[in-house]
Amino acid sequence: MHTPPPAEHAGALRHKLPRIRMPLVIAGVTTITGLILLCWPPLELPTAQGRAAGLAIIAIGLWATSQLPEHLTALLFFLLAMLVGVAPSSVIFSGFSSSAFWMVFAGLVIALGAKSSGLSERLAHSIALKLNGSYLSLISGVMLVGVLLGFLMPSSMGRVVVLLVPVILALAESFGFAAGSNGRIGVLLAATFGSFVPTFAILPANVPNMILVGTSETLFGIAPLYGEYLLLHFPVLGLLKSAVIIGLIVWRFPDRPKPYTGRTDNSSPLSRIEWKMAGILLLALTFWLTDFVHHISPAWIALSAAMLLLLPRIGLISAQQFSNDINYSPLFFIAGVLGMGALISHSGLGARAATQLTTILPLEPGNNLLNYTSLAFISLVTGIATTQPGVPAVLTPLADQIALASGLPIKTVLMTQVLGFSTTLLLFQAPPLVIAMRLSGESTRPAIVLALLLALVTIVLLLPLDYLWWRLLGWL
């Protein structure tokens, strides 16, 4: 007769068994599913759309679970896309010619210049003197800096990569937060999420906002005003969401800053190198703030600043520093994400998915709550399929059909897109967040956790509050 093993023996046996890691399982399932679609596209879809779906599932699964470094997933996407011939190389590698790619490159150079010149450390000490107190006040202050930059600088990638990361890393060090500590992660998340997530409520602050304005004006002659857009979105998606982010960081990544022991006197004159770095930054900031006059892309302004820093004799960064101290992996990640979005758009998969959603989801004239919920869901799902800049590109041409089915004004339908593209469910949707974590040397997992928690609170609490705010303003 068989007797069960003793409890301690069973426990030892359990310890010997391999531990199942859910992210690994998800990555494996999505990769296998994507490969099946690549080899045998479903008959219901054109071959190009089926293969594009397979590539997207593989890339999204690996980026969402971080089972491969982001740049390796991007390289895998490029390789598979070219092997199966799903689209022309000009589409697959279009990310390398985008302004976002060159903004990241320029940001890497400018961040190195700010660090090597000592200017980032000086700025960090200036901020530290004002935030020297509790962990809550430190996180809140850093968050406020990030949001305020959204009013000053038009590119989220530039704000995060160029200005914030080098300063915030020096700030964390001045409060005694070591690499990998909750405090360092918390300060970094406050800066990056603060300069990116709430600023979707500020009209020129992020790329999807401007795509929405441009396409709606081109197709329907509707161009939201700065103040109108701010009043509609900023109270809930800006201010309240900022408070939620602060609360989640303090709760999920608690820490206690050491008493500030860094430089207490910043009155010493700037060195010649600091003056040069400050002058280049101020020149770039001046052009960023006056883009409504000259219409030069923020990326080319940043690239001009990077060129000045790299020039022999004039610049601050030597050829050796450029070769040794710049991490190029974020460039491949941003190119991969943008290439995937271009592929989905080129194949027609994004538009097909959005059209199917509009026919499946309930839209009923007169039922504003149902329509609001459905349109927020459409925008949210489209953002996962196409990344955030793809939402207005895909949904804006469908606005007149959606308005007819829902009975809502086209302007209201257009503004519901912000509900979706301002909510980040999977981190690959938001390249500035991933790149900031990579530049800091920290894992992306804390940012993934915060993004998921924030999305949950947004869906359960903030979107219902936003519905009431829209009703109060007469938009619904």
Image: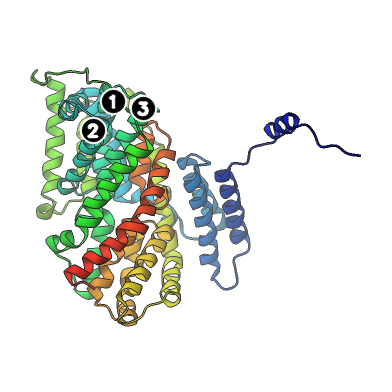
Instruction: Tell me the CA gap for discs 2 and 3.
Output: 35 Å
Q: Residues within 10 Å of mark 2 (few under 14, many from 20)?
A: many
The residue carrying mark 2 is 138
Closer to the chain start, of discs 2 and 1, is 2
| Discs 2/3, front | 2
Asked which quadrant contains residue 318, the reply is: top left
The relative height of residue 154 versus residue 330 in the rendered view (above or below) is below
Q: Position of residue 161 (x, y in %)?
A: 28, 38
Count residues near mark 1 (Cα–Cα under 10 Å), then give few for <14, some for 14-19, many for 20+: many
* Identity, as a three-letter code, of the amino acid under mark 3: Ser
Task: Please identify the quadrant where the C terminus is shown.
Answer: bottom left
Task: Determine which residue is flagged by label 1.
Answer: 257
Going from N to C along the chain, the mark reached first, 2 or 3, is 2
Q: At 36% from the left edge and 64% from the top edge, which residue is drawn?
A: 379
Q: Position of residue 350 (x, y in %)?
A: 43, 66
Q: Position of residue 263 (x, y in %)?
A: 17, 18
